[in-house]
């Protein structure tokens, strides 16, 4: 057997174990009975451990080294398999298992303390845990290694090849433009009409979401739509990518845009060739690029006027209260901008400001320039400066997100990068498909999906995100397309 | 670490892998999208292979040998863990992996040929495959080893410690009594009224099934009831035992008794202590004892007059057509005896005759005394002799069951033994709980479940079935209690 083939088989086994864990995870979030929790934790723990043991095994290192000698004859996918395999192997080996185990235990404890602290709006409770997490994360950044900034080592987990300097430059420039733009909108614009009050039945919402997913090209013979406490998308391997959603009976839009969002993730997943998946190249170029696909369908498509010209009758067939509204009214309604305290509820204009704030604080924390006890004050000051609102307490401020309690530093930027990639991809797509609005007005999204499949999905995780971005758009990532998009769109929405 | 503890950890890992495979299996039969089939086969194949590799590993043998030296200090459960571990290890090692792989491939092919042969009622198509399977199974019996009869080696898989001679004696005696009893019933008895024609809505049936499961004591916070093509029960580990069912809208009883049947399996599973489960001692004493629990609830309880005195109003609340029927009429209706061609549709009197026939043919096939080409003729002759009916073609005769195409020889007897165990357990239970009918009339099944838990469930797979039977009833397994039960019950049903 060639070394490459041996490596392929080795990686496939890790992927199979991870897919088995994904099945167990999906079930735990949808159908598992309450008393199954403890057993399930044991089973998923075992599967993850078996996959992780294989990932850090010296055997894997040897197979990678042997395969590297055969790269001259290898396909592009095989070369990517070796590159990503090495990267994953080296990152996982950088942290000694005992240290990592201690970190996982700390985070498990910290998450439950964070829950309590958030419920009581008591940052002091969480503070010592967060301080310990930050210390261990800084330690890990050293173990992993970096060229310029310790935060680079963390960012790499979510955005392979991306640096703190690059993200700082992109998000910094974005923030400088967004803050005055937001002020202008709110001071000079005409706000859109509100969502009509009413009871929006869950079953009708769910049917509408399924309709939207079908419209996008989501393949229900290779997926499902189920209920869960928090919406998510999960790939259980080729031919099986599932989405979940939740429903608010006072407002039909969160579920609808949730479906478009998760559907965007799912289309990416459904579009990765099975061959790449089993080579460990499923899952998308990065968290940011994955997020670009969800935000693309949710915002670039789903919150566009052309989309509502097609979709409005579908909405009003389920909910008669919209019958007399125009597509333009719906378009404006779903694009309302309102500075708020909570990231997950934020609109397209303010969302990235929430991320800028977190990114800046994270970088300083990891650099050792900001102390955990200074966080609430810095948080509130930045909220006031960027968004013009101040949290009444820390539950609605620094304690709102789960990420830090789970030790996930370096994750937040992906959300903003996703928005930027989505806009930059859309500019490239529009150049290729000038009749996009016309097609959307007819409900024809097929050319969009084909374009995304051809340019992005079919490569899975073969390229680093910036490589992919250049391949797709001819340029490195920039905030400019996103800013152009906002200006054009909100001029319409706010009648500037 | 003590050798026993090391062995426990080793076994727990195999159990965890099997539980993970069970989650994937359940999902595949209930919610998996159509296009997920291929990926799923790969994932479950990998999990089974990882568990099997551990089962046959010399490491397991060494751990078992080391643990055996510590048995003087061990608990009863630990001794059972070592005994069953050795048994499983040695059986699995007896078949060389290459031989087993060839057998699995043959069966996979044979199953699809069998499907076609059954659809076309063409035994000739299936014959060469079955002949090859029988040859390989006879070979495997030699590899596994046996004292008296090669069939012993196969029976052992399903009924640890049971022999062909014992089963032959029990089932032979049973058949001798059943054949004339059946004739007497049909010639001299008054047949029960038929099930009223009507449309029995699936949703109402499902709600009734859930009600019946709750009545039995099935814990929905540690389980679920879902739809599937064939009803089954599956344990996904402590706290998570699920049942599935299917519904025929022309007759509400198959689903109801299906629920009681699966519920019986599920209660056994829910009653095994978690500690035993992780020691590889979940899953019941044998297939026959597991079947005894399903048949106990389905027939001994669910088809009793006392049960219908309580449950009839619940049935007629869902289906008004039963409102004017008496509990006794329902009791008679659900106990109709009718010799039929198909085992899975058979009533309590004829069911075991179907099994006797299969057992006799299997024993002769494995002994080399019966040739595969003689099967259809022997089948039809036995059907005529035992049941008085002759299949119009082989699809309704020798081709009806999937078992042989899957290489499952030795499995069928468990179905009959289950019925016999159930009756023998019921006699012991009645001696302990003389007010059983009174309790059932009030819908109080709690004492029944407590008795089963205390006497059977809590031991999991610690004892061989005949050991357990003696422990529970003071006697070895015998057909007499079952025959007494039939005579008493059918005298009432058929007004003899």
Image (tube, coloured by chain):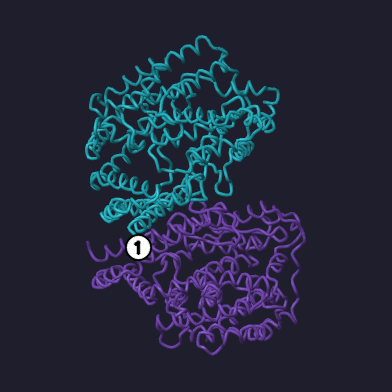
Chain colours: A cyan, B purple
Q: In which quarter of the image is the N terminus of chain B?
A: bottom left
**Height in image: A184 above or below B405?**
above
Q: Pick whichever, A465 or B473, lies toward us.
A: A465
Q: Is mark 1 on a helix, strand or loop?
A: loop
User: Residue, x 72% and y 75% (percent of image)?
Assistant: B494
Which quadrant of the figure has residue B46? Answer: bottom left
Give the percent coordinates (x, y) of residue A149: 25, 30
Can you see residue A241?
yes
Disc 1 sits on a residue from what chain? A
Quadrant placement of the C terminus of chain B: bottom right
As drawn, the residue found furthest toward the front would be A72
What residue is at 34 percent from the left and 60 percent from the top? A2
Q: Is residue A238 above or below residue A294?
A: below
Mark 1 Cα-neighbour bin, 10 Å: few <14, some 14–19, many ≥20: few
Which is more toward the observer, A313 or B64?
Answer: A313
Residue A202 appears in the rendering: no
Residue A203, percent across and down? 63, 38
Horizontally, residue B346 falls left or right of residue A489, namely right
The spot of residue A477 in percent (x, y) is 40, 28
From the image, tell me which residue sits under label 1. Answer: A1
> A188 or A110: which is nearer to us?
A188
Establish if A79 lies above or below A245.
below
């Amino acid at each position: 057997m060639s070394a490459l083939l041996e490596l392929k088989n080795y990686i496939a086994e890790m992927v199979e174990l991870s897919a088995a864990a994904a099945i167990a995870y999906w079930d735990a979030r949808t159908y598992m009975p309450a008393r199954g929790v403890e057993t399930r934790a044991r089973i998923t723990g075992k599967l993850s451990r078996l996959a992780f043991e294989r990932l850090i095994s010296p055997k894997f290192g040897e197979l990678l080294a042997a395969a590297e000698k055969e790269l001259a004859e290898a396909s592009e996918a095989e070369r990517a398999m070796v590159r990503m395999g090495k990267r994953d192997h080296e990152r996982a080996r950088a942290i000694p298992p005992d240290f990592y185990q201690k970190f996982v235990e700390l985070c498990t404890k910290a998450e439950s303390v964070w829950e309590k602290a958030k419920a009581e709006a008591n940052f002091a409770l969480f503070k010592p845990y967060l301080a310990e997490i930050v210390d261990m994360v800084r330690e890990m950044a050293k173990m992993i290694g970096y060229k310029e900034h310790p935060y680079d080592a963390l960012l790499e987990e979510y955005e392979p090849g991306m640096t703190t300097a690059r993200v700082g430059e992109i998000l910094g420039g974005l923030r400088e433009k967004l803050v005055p733009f937001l002020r202008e909108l709110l001071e000079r614009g005409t706000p859109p009409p509100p969502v009509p009050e009413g009871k929006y039945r869950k079953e009708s919402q769910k049917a509408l979401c399924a309709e939207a997913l079908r419209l996008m090209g989501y393949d229900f013979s290779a997926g499902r739509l189920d209920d869960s406490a928090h919406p998510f998308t999960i790939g259980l391997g080729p031919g099986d990518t599932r989405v979940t959603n939740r429903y608010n009976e006072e407002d039909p839009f969160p579920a609808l845009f949730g479906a478009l969002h998760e559907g965007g993730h799912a289309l990416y997943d459904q579009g990765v060739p099975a061959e790449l998946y089993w080579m460990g190249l499923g899952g998308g170029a990065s968290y940011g690029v994955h997020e670009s696909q969800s935000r693309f369908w949710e915002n670039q498509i789903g919150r566009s006027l052309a989309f509502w010209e097609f979709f409005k009758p579908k909405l009003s067939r389920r909910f008669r209260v919209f019958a007399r509204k125009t597509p333009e009214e719906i378009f404006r309604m779903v694009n309302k901008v309102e500075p708020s305290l909570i990231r997950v509820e934020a609109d397209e204009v303010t969302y990235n400001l929430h991320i800028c704030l977190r990114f800046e604080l994270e970088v300083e924390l990891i650099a050792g320039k900001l102390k955990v006890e200074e966080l609430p004050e810095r948080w509130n000051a930045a909220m006031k400066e960027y968004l013009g609102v101040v949290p009444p307490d820390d539950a609605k401020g620094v304690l709102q997100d789960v990420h830090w309690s789970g030790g996930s530093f370096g994750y937040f930027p992906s959300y903003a990068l996703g928005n930027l990639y989505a806009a930059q991809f859309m500019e490239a797509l529009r150049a290729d498909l000038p009749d996009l609005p016309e097609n959307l007005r007819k409900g024809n999204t097929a050319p969009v999906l084909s374009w995304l499949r051809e340019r992005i999905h079919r490569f899975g995780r073969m390229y680093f995100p910036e490589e992919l971005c250049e391949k797709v758009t001819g340029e490195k990532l920039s905030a400019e397309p996103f800013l152009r998009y906002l200006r054009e769109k909100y001029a319409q929405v706010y009648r500037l």
